[in-house]
Amino acid sequence: MTMDFASRVERVEPSATLAISNKAAELEAEGKDVVDLSVGEPDFDTPENIKDAAKDALDAGHTGYTSSNGIPELKEAIADKLHDDGLTQYDPDNLIVTPGGKQALYEIFQTVIDDGDEVALLDPAWVSYEAMAKLAGGTLTRIDTAAHDFQLEGALDDLADAVSDETELLVVNSPGNPHGAVYSRDAMEGVRDLAVEHDITVISDEIYKEITYDGVEAISLGTLDGMEDRTITLNGFSKAYSMTGWRLGYFAGPEELISQAGKVHSHSVSCAVNFVQHAGVEAITNTDDAVEEMRQAFAERREFLMELFEDHGVHVPEPQGAFYMMPEIAPDGDDTEWCDQAISEAQVATVPGTAFGTPGYARISYANSKERLQEAVDRLAEADLI
């Protein structure tokens, strides 16, 4: 039998980041020592108080279905956090709690994008944005920020040229994956002006909001005048609370969006895991010290790795948030080939910039110890890759 597949699925490539992780796992299974700098998760264990809250919830019998959009305690805690961030337009009824931030994004795309709708992405852009747009039937317009060291402010004219009244959705990720850039207030106000002018809905992906450096503030788009009702704010627990495997995220938006997205949510995942939601309440209300400890560790590693690359003459736009950086490793060559050589010859796993729409660069995660970061750079140097 010949099985036919949906064209929307055949339009999508497998995740490049997961492909690299799979390659690293294969080499490790062969007994090779791989320094994996491709992973998009903190290398810290989930804080003990969060794990204890999950255990308590299990013991209390919180193992069944919950209300589809999330337990009231968690939605109230999230709404309080959003209010603290200046997003006072969001109440608990403006929220859907999802099994991970990725599911939140998927539900938003499925709700907002129809066949042929235009989605604008700021490159380098996280790999799944493109896939989700295509799965929803959308078309893509891309704006390159590489010439501006991944900052958006210098690319606002390009953004203005790229969007129009035909643009349905713009995705803004700050602090960003894969580059670690944090967009300035002027840049965000530029986004606001274009969104209002062309009546564009904007996703503000704030999954790394709690991880910034040097006193840099991550601006929430939904706090700007004119953006209250056109911004969908997304966040989750994976990065700041080191809860990647727990799969817990959320998004907030106007009530009409929540009503429509709730159909996708209820018919796909029903609800997020019950006892995990209870752990989420503990994470969001009582884990500031652990978050700060992780942030400080990432800050030290960022400085350490930046200096190592600088010693080898490699240009790296300085990240202001998240735990990634993008060195320019193949300005005149093939970044995919470079990454293949890095893992095959040096056993260092990285992700090619092409996967994010930015050839010539590689994404490096510094969610690893200083010793392993040093080992990675030494290996790359020995293999004449830097």
Image: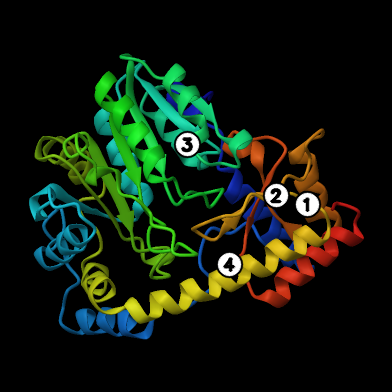
Which residue position is annotated with label 4? 367
Under tag 2, what secondary structure? loop
4 and 2 marks in contact (CB < 8 Å): no
Of residues 45 and 274, the one nearer the viewer is 45
1 and 3 marks in contact (CB < 8 Å): no
The circle drawn on residue 30 is none
| Nearer-N-terminus badge (1/3) | 3
Which tag is nearer the camera, tag 4 or tag 1? 1
Rate crowding at label 2 as few (under 14), some (14 to 19) or many (20 or more) other CA atoms within 10 Å: many
Q: Is residue 313 left or right of residue 22?
A: right
Q: Amino acid at mark 3?
A: Glu
| Nearer-N-terminus badge (4/2) | 2
Which residue position is annotated with label 2? 327
Rate crowding at label 3 as few (under 14), some (14 to 19) or many (20 or more) other CA atoms within 10 Å: some
Of residues 247 and 318, the one nearer the viewer is 318
| Nearer-N-terminus badge (2/3) | 3
2 and 1 marks in contact (CB < 8 Å): yes
Which residue position is annotated with label 3? 153
Q: Amino acid at mark 1?
A: Val
Q: CA distance from mark 2 to mark 3?
A: 20 Å
| Nearer-N-terminus badge (2/1) | 1
| Nearer-N-terminus badge (4/1) | 1
Percent across and percent down for residue 324 are 58, 56
Which residue position is annotated with label 1? 314
